[in-house]
Image (tube, helix red, strand yellow):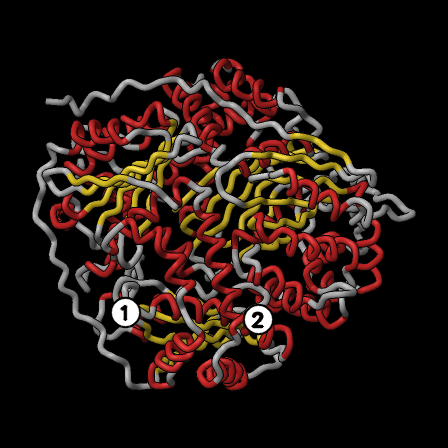
């Protein structure tokens, strides 16, 4: 149970306060309701590049990091296809510094040309390091456009290609800020060794004078239902073959979301899961195999991925995955197997309460979904899932004409054999 | 109107309080340390064993035995072990490190009487079945093929090999090392290493009287030492004579750089002052290396430096991945930053920031009772006591710019650094 209070400033900023006096620290987390899905198709990677620019100084404060480090604080941020999230942890005695810094960059950035130029380079190096200079690093650049034809999920958060990042101009940065970075599009969570009164006072002091801005109304083309089998084969300088099978699934707020997540757990969570036991240990088809979902706010992906052993053909590997999917479509899973993944989810929720930052981020995410209090009812929703619902979900998702298969074929080079 | 240009007042960080453990020793020699705190009805229990002496002819035994502990006992198959743990919502982990190997259980208190017997079985009756061993050898070799395509991984392997030599610290596993693993060797290694006298148990979380009683009950009378005690000494480090290693990858977009040298460990009086100097150079986001090479030049997504500490010694290292075309330029900039710290005093403004940052990060690293247990492990296995942390905070608060400059001159000679580059140069 994560207790909290909630209030909204006149400019529309939603504020959630979670008092936890077992720690001498405080967290200030701000979620902006903007992600890669909100980008222009000709300017992809912008939400993420923008996240970097948020550290390049704001209108009244030339350096963001320096004053925070000076009071013993640390910060970071991440961008996904759905959201951009910034967080600070610092000794609670210095919490006001976090309000000062975050409110100033919500008010306005410095928009420095130098910062844009440097961060463009940094992000290009990030692109190379994580997506291009790694075996299989480009998987999301290839898989997303296979699964999504209309929706903006068809590009990865880093962007479609490096060119889009190279082309970013300061005017684009300013327009993006104006459109998305205002109190109405943000949720702030303050947690740790703080009081509700103190947070109210500091929020009023630092955030109330920020203009509300214009509300951004999202109106994205939704992805139509898939009715064709899709496939792409890539020959690449990778050491091993690799198979990805991605299915379209529902959105995070769909009623069957909980059954689908447990379905992925039954298939692939831990060493007792079906795919590991059957395909890695018993039948010896793969060296590793995984199933997971993207939990996206719009229509998501259910992904199966495995690296077949060297004596196994791609056809055999795919067939082996499909056998397991057919099995779970045709036979209801034993009650014990469902109880197992439910217990695991239940204890994961309890363990996540050990971390102040996790609690703060969770509260912000659920508030974005509609109500922070949903966090406290999540476990019950997983526990209510039935074996019948899992079977129904499996039949709905695991259809050949709902699948996109991406195969990496290893082009053997000398270094791969060394 | 508020003045947004003016930073709010801030307070110095003073109240760093560490939770210290309760100690119990069982009749079989096993030591138990308990950290009791927290609101959640859960515990983390770690069984930590010192690795056996490194044998260059059979270098992977410590790692293989640890990794395969969950693969079957005389009573339970791998599948049954996994089922039992998962059914009770628990998490079972095995971790292999340079010096110690461990088994970790995360469990809700209410299920401990189901989950603890599984651990007891693993620690007393593992059999390393042939089929699972073959699967392990094959899958590890597949993983190795992928790792060896990553420039940063190759750079780390080459660097460790250069500064530590043919020891447990310098080992980079080869395909042949995996192929030559034998079940009989694993069993013999297991029997000698996983004994109560070579085990430290660390319990953290909500510990009720019956929690501890249950642990004692499960791991005392039924767990006896064997005839041969564990030899946990390690051979001396053997740094190489060559100091420059370049592996060319003609198609690399980025080059991985790793450089540094063998260094003193935590027990040496210079270690803590060097932690401050290291932070200035490359130990946080605002460090000299980040400010110059990422935030000014944009050569990289990240660059950092660090200190490693273990029983036999330690290391100082700088690591990054940079655009292939700016690899040489990066080395020049790193050298410049090192030289600056040797020739000019760190300005008071920067030093005070680093002091506060380090104290804040120390405080922030004590997030929950698990972190208090982790702080204990760092000193306990180095043979130190809690004074270490008092000294650490006082070093951070009082060290002078002159002392930092002295240390930079004492330890950092850029030409003498071991340097590894994988990619283009």
Discs 1 and 2 lie in a common subunit = yes
Q: Nearer the viewer, residue B138 or B8?
A: B8
Q: Residue at x 69, y 45 (%)?
A: B214
In this image, B134 relative to B335: left or right? right
In this picture, is B217 found above or below A61?
A: below
In this picture, is B157 found above or below B142?
A: above
In the rendering, at what x and y percent does residue A299 appear? 27, 69
Question: Mark 1 or 2 closer to N-term?
Answer: 2
Q: Residue at x 55, y 63 (%)?
A: A270
Q: Nearer the viewer, residue A178 or B75?
A: B75
Which residue, given by chain and number where applicable, does mark 2 sit on?
A276
In the rendering, at what x and y percent does residue A378 appear? 36, 57
Extreme-right residue of the structure: B227
> On residue A18, which mark appears?
none
Which residue, given by chain and number where applicable, does mark 1 sit on?
A299
In this picture, is A252 found above or below B189?
A: below
Q: Residue at x 72, y 46 (%)?
A: B168
Badge 2 sits on which subunit?
Answer: A
Q: Residue at x 57, y 50 (%)?
A: B110
In the rendering, at what x and y percent does residue B1 appear? 10, 22
Which of the 4 quarters of the picture holds residue B345? top left
Extreme-front residue of the structure: B210
In this image, B32 relative to A11: left or right? right
Q: Nearer the viewer, residue A47 or B92?
A: B92
Badge 1 sits on which subunit?
Answer: A
Dot 2 falls on a residue whose secondary structure is helix
In this image, A152 relative to B128: left or right? left
């Amino acid at each position: 149970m994560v207790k909290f209070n909630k209030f909204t400033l006149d400019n529309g900023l939603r504020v959630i306060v979670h008092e936890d006096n077992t720690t001498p620290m405080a967290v200030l987390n701000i979620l902006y309701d903007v992600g890669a899905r909100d980008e222009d198709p000709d300017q992809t990677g912008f939400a993420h590049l923008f996240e970097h620019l948020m550290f390049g100084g704001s209108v009244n404060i030339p350096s963001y990091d320096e004053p925070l480090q000076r009071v013993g604080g640390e910060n970071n941020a991440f961008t996904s296809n759905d959201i951009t999230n910034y967080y600070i942890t610092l000794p609670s005695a210095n919490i006001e510094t976090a309000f000062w810094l975050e409110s100033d960059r919500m008010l306005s950035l410095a928009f420095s040309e130098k910062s844009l130029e440097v961060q463009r380079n940094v992000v290009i190096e990030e692109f190379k390091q994580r997506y291009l200079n790694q075996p299989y690093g480009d998987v999301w650049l290839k898989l997303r456009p296979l699964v999504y034809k209309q929706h903006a999920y068809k590009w990865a958060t880093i962007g479609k290609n490096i060119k889009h990042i190279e082309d970013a101009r300061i005017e684009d940065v300013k327009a993006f800020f104006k459109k998305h970075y205002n109190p109405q599009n943000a949720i702030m969570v303050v947690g740790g060794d703080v009081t509700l009164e103190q947070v109210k006072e500091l929020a009023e002091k630092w955030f109330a004078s920020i203009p509300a801005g214009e509300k951004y109304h999202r109106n994205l083309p939704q992805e139509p239902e898939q009715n064709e089998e899709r496939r792409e084969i890539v020959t690449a300088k990778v050491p091993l073959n690799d198979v990805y099978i991605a299915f379209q699934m529902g959105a995070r707020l769909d009623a069957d979301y909980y059954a689908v997540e447990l379905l992925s757990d039954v298939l692939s969570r831990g060493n007792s899961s079906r795919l590991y036991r059957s395909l890695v240990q018993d039948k010896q088809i793969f060296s590793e195999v995984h199933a997971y979902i993207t939990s996206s706010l719009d229509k998501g992906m259910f992904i199966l991925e495995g690296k077949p052993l060297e004596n196994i053909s791609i056809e055999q590997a795919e067939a082996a995955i499909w056998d397991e999917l057919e099995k779970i479509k045709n036979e209801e899973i034993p009650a014990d197997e469902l109880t197992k993944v439910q217990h695991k989810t239940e204890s994961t929720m309890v363990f996540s309460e050990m971390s102040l930052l996790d609690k703060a981020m969770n509260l912000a995410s659920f508030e974005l979904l509609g109500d922070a209090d949903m966090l406290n009812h999540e476990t019950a929703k997983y526990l209510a899932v039935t074996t019948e619902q899992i079977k129904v979900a499996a039949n709905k998702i695991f259809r050949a004409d709902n699948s996109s298969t991406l195969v990496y074929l290893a082009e053997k080079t000398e270094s791969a054999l060394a | 109107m508020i003045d947004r240009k003016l930073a709010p007042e801030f307070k110095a960080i003073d109240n760093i309080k560490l939770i210290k453990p309760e100690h119990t020793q069982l009749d079989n020699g096993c030591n138990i340390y308990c950290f009791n705190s927290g609101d959640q009805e859960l515990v983390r229990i770690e069984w930590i064993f010192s690795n056996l002496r490194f044998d260059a002819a059979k270098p992977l035994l410590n790692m293989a035995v640890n990794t395969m502990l969950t693969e079957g006992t005389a009573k339970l198959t791998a599948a049954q072990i996994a089922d039992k743990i998962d059914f009770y919502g628990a998490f079972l982990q095995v971790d292999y490190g340079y010096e110690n190997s461990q088994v970790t259980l995360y469990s809700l208190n209410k299920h401990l009487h189901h989950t603890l017997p599984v651990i007891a079985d693993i620690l007393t009756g593992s059999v390393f079945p042939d089929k699972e061993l073959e699967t392990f050898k094959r899958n590890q070799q597949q993983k190795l093929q992928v790792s060896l395509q990553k420039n940063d991984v190759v750079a780390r392997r080459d660097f460790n090999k250069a500064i530590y030599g043919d020891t447990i610290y310098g080992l980079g596993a080869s395909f042949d090392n995996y192929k030559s693993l034998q079940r009989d060797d694993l069993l013999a290694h297991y029997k000698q290493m996983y004994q109560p006298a070579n085990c430290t148990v660390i319990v953290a979380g909500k510990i009720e009287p019956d929690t501890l009683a249950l642990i004692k009950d499960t791991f005392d009378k039924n767990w006896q030492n064997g005839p041969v005690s564990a030899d946990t000494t390690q051979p001396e480090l053997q740094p190489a004579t060559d100091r420059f290693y370049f592996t060319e990858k003609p198609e690399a977009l980025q080059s991985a750089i790793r450089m540094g040298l063998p260094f003193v460990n935590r027990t040496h009086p210079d270690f803590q002052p060097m932690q401050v100097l290291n932070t200035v150079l490359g130990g946080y986001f605002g460090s000299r290396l980040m400010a110059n090479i990422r935030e000014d030049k944009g050569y990289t997504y990240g660059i950092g430096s660090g200190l490693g500490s273990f029983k036999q010694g330690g290391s100082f290292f700088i690591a990054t991945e940079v655009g292939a075309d700016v690899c040489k330029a990066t080395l020049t900039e790193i050298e410049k930053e090192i030289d600056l710290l040797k020739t000019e005093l760190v300005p008071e403004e920067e030093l005070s920031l680093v002091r506060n940052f380090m104290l804040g990060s120390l405080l922030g690293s004590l997030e929950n009772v698990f972190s208090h247990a982790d702080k204990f492990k760092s000193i306990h296995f180095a043979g130190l006591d809690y004074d270490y942390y008092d000294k650490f905070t006082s070093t951070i608060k009082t060290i002078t710019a002159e002392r930092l400059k002295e240390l930079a001159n004492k330890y950092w000679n850029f030409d003498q650094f071991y340097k590894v580059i994988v990619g283009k140069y």
